[in-house]
């Protein structure tokens, strides 16, 4: 008996269906374009232009020289967890057990992924706001959940409201995802706005993931409120944080998750099997950051504030409507009204004509269409030159 020849599938068919259907990051294409061009001022990457403060670097080098090149505990060095717990208690009056409720992760991004995979079942809905960091919806989907977007607009300075979230709740809703201060818009939520969202979470018995990686970068008279510090929210909040933005430590890849012990038991399992532990030298660096880094945080904050005010004023003078960002280090001007160019065309033509890199707002969700994200973590002199180039570009393309 002659067997039939085996029909072989295309190689791409071996991919997971969710991964195959998922579009690549809308930011990545612009990074690739930038890499092939010279004399570009890039205002695209959400990364401080500052080098990590010297004492933090020295602490990591000293750890290597002392032979600290081995794994730490899965959850991270206990000294680091104790310092994070103390910091959260002192700054936001919310307490965590460093042994059972804190986990050191490979950046806040790993914390988002591990938290989602540990808590979501197939079909669970997670309400999140757009525009937002590009990884939120994919992480929800990769964990088997359903990402439910709530569009925010310039009418509310891109702040999500409790009624918006309430309107999106269904019987399948399991959680809310918040990312404030916000990437890409620079929006920040006041305490009363967070309290209203907390009531929605309580009324519908929902979990809340709160990405607070920019917690130290708020401006004006605003103060950051940790979501888990709100009455009744500690037991239903997964708090995500890290060192990348406030301490200029993006490449160190060091973050943390704080959550009730019952949730952390599951999150730690995902972390154990996927990561083992965060990089040991980075943990020593983070310890030094918490011990001695506060003056550096304040200095970086004040310099970002100077750049923020300059960039916001220039955009509005140029005629690109830009609300005042109150957190993080991004402006989110509207470009389509003044130029007639959609956000993708604006970014591409600005790059080609004036060698300035910005990111289309639609890369962060469809509610960002018509806007571009512009990072003011670049050097001040580069920002000044870039704004001059943008002004020339807008003058040529004014609608």
Image: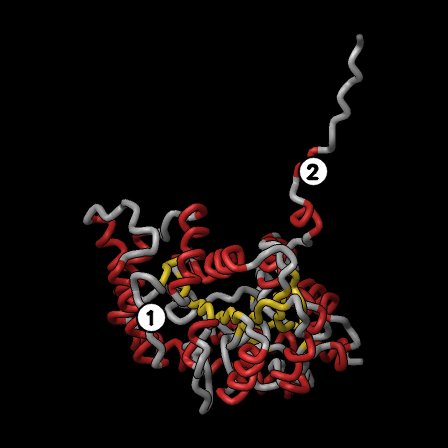
Q: Residues within 10 Å of mark 2 (few under 14, many from 20)?
A: few
Q: Judging from the image, what secondary structure is the residue with disc 1 in?
A: loop
Of residue 370 and residue 181, the one placed in the foreground of this image is 181
- What residue lies at 71% left-to-right and 77% top-to-bottom? 335
Q: Is residue 237 left or right of residue 82?
A: right
Can you give x and y, in whole percent of width and height, for residue 209 in the image? Answer: 51, 69
Residue 260, by quadrant, is bottom left
Can you give x and y, in whole percent of width and height, for residue 348 in the image? Answer: 70, 64
- What residue lies at 80% left-to-right and 10% top-to-bottom? 2
Q: Residues within 10 Å of mark 1 (few under 14, many from 20)?
A: many
Of residue 347 and residue 223, the one placed in the foreground of this image is 223
Query: Can you tell which mark lies on residue 76?
Result: none
* Quadrant for the C terminus in the image: bottom right
Q: Is residue 353 left or right of residue 51?
A: right
Above or below, 22 against 300 in this view is above
> Mark 1 and mark 2: span between their CA atoms?
45 Å
- Residue sitting farthest toward the top: 1
Residue at image mark 2 = 12
- Residue sitting farthest toward the left: 66
- What residue lies at 42% left-to-right and 68% top-to-bottom? 241
Q: Is residue 44 visible?
A: yes
Above or below, 77 against 381 in this view is above
Residue at image mark 1 = 96
- Point out the tag, 1 or 2, that comes first from the N-terminus: 2
Q: Is residue 311 visible?
A: no
Of residue 302 and residue 4, the one placed in the foreground of this image is 4
Q: Judging from the image, what secondary structure is the residue with disc 2 in?
A: helix
- What residue lies at 54% left-to-right and 75% top-to-bottom? 182
């Amino acid at each position: 008996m002659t067997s039939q020849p085996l029909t072989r599938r295309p190689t791409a068919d071996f991919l997971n269906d969710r991964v195959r259907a998922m579009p690549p990051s809308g930011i990545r294409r612009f990074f690739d374009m930038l890499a092939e061009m010279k004399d570009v001022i890039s205002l695209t990457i959400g990364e401080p232009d500052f080098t990590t403060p010297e004492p933090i670097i020295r602490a990591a080098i000293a750890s290597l020289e002392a032979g600290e090149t081995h794994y730490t505990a899965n959850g991270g060095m206990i000294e680091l967890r104790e310092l994070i717990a103390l910091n959260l208690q002192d700054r936001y009056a919310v307490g965590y057990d460093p042994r059972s409720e804190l986990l050191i992760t490979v950046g806040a991004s790993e914390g988002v992924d591990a938290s989602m995979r540990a808590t979501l079942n197939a079909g669970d809905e997670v309400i999140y706001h757009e525009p937002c960091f590009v990884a939120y919806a994919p992480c929800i989907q990769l964990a088997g959940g359903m990402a439910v977007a709530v569009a925010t607009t310039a009418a509310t300075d891109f702040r999500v409201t409790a009624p918006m979230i309430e309107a999106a709740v269904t019987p399948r809703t399991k959680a809310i995802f918040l990312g404030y201060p916000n990437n890409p818009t620079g929006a920040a939520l006041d305490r009363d706005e967070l309290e209203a969202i907390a009531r929605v979470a309580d009324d519908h018995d929902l979990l809340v993931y709160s990405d607070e990686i920019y917690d130290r970068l708020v401006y004006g008279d605003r103060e950051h409120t940790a979501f888990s510090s709100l009455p009744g929210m500690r037991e239903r909040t997964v708090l995500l944080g890290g060192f990348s933005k406030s301490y200029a430590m993006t490449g160190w890849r060091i973050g943390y998750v704080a959550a009730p012990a019952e949730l952390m038991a599951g999150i730690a399992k995902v972390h154990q099997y996927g990561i083992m532990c965060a990089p040991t030298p980075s943990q020593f660096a983070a310890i030094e950051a918490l011990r001695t880094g506060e003056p550096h945080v304040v200095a970086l904050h004040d310099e970002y504030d100077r750049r923020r005010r300059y960039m916001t004023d220039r955009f509005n003078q140029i005629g690109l409507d830009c609300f005042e960002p109150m957190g993080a280090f991004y402006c989110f001007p509207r470009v389509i009204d003044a130029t007639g160019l959609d956000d993708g065309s604006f970014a591409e033509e600005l790059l080609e004509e004036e060698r300035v890199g910005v990111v289309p707002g639609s890369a962060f969700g469809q509610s960002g269409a018509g806007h571009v994200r512009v990072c003011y973590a670049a050097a001040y002199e580069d920002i000044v030159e870039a704004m001059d180039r943008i002004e020339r570009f807008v003058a040529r393309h004014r609608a």
